[in-house]
Structure formats: structure tokens, C-alpha cells
Image (spheres, grey):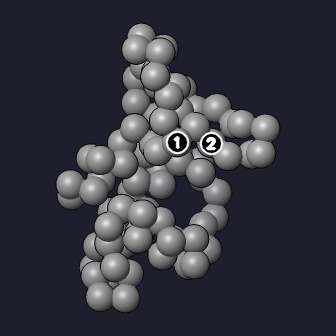
């Protein structure tokens, strides 16, 4: 999903907005953050992988840590 040029429907965008802590019904002016986050590449040192069920997770080789959440989500929440 992240960093990919695929079309996201309005329902998916609103769900992602809530994931970032944005209420799409009252904070519509912040939806640009969601679109920007969805286009964000994986930061250096991280790689995206898919589990057997098609869910994306992220792995940081140096720390040997993994996360279900995109490594940049915290940044976009802060915006």
C-alpha cells in the first residue's frame, strides 16, 4: 500500500486516516497527510515484506526488528 501508485478508494483512505488519528468527518483538511503517507517510501534500512496472508510488515535489518506499522506512521501522526 505505501509507496505504491495504486488507487485508494475513499473508504480505505478514511480507514487509514483513523489509523493516523485523523477524523475524516471533522478534519477533512488533514486528508492530504493521509495521501502523502500512503505515497511515502520505506525509509532507508527498512524493507517491506508480505506474510502468508498478504499482510505487509516492515523489517529493519540493522536492529533485526519488525513492525506491522509503516516506519513513517509516527512522523505522519505528528503532522
Image-based side of 9 in relation to 64, left or right? right
Q: Which residue is mark 2?
A: 56
Query: Considering the image in quadrants, where does the C terminus appear?
Result: bottom left
Image coordinates for residue 74, horizontal then vertical, percent: 29, 47
Residue 68 got which mark? 1
Q: Which SS class for mark 1?
A: loop
Position of residue 7 relative to residue 67, above or below, is below
* Residue pictured at 20% horizontal, 54% vertical: 78
Residue 19 visible, this orientation: yes
Q: Dividing the picture into quarters, in which one does residue 19 lie? A: bottom left
Q: Which SS class for mark 2?
A: strand
**CB under 8 Å between discs 1 and 2:** yes
* Residue pictured at 34% horizontal, 79% vertical: 23
Q: Residues within 10 Å of mark 1 (few under 14, many from 20)?
A: few
* Residue pictured at 62% horizontal, 42% vertical: 56
Measured in 3D between alpha carbons, the distance from the residue under mark 1 to the one under mark 2, in whole angstroms, is 7 Å
- For this orientation, the residue located farthest to the bottom is 25
Image coordinates for residue 69, horizontal then vertical, percent: 46, 44
Amino acid at each position: 500500500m505505501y509507496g505504491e501508485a495504486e488507487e485508494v478508494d475513499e473508504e480505505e483512505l478514511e480507514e487509514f486516516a483513523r489509523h493516523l488519528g485523523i477524523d475524516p468527518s471533522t478534519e477533512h483538511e488533514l486528508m492530504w497527510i493521509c495521501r502523502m503517507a500512503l505515497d511515502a517510501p520505506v525509509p532507508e534500512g527498512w524493507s517491506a515484506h508480505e506474510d502468508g496472508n498478504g499482510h505487509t510488515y516492515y523489517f529493519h535489518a540493522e536492529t533485526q526488528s519488525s513492525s506491522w506499522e509503516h516506519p513513517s506512521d509516527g512522523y505522519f501522526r505528528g503532522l
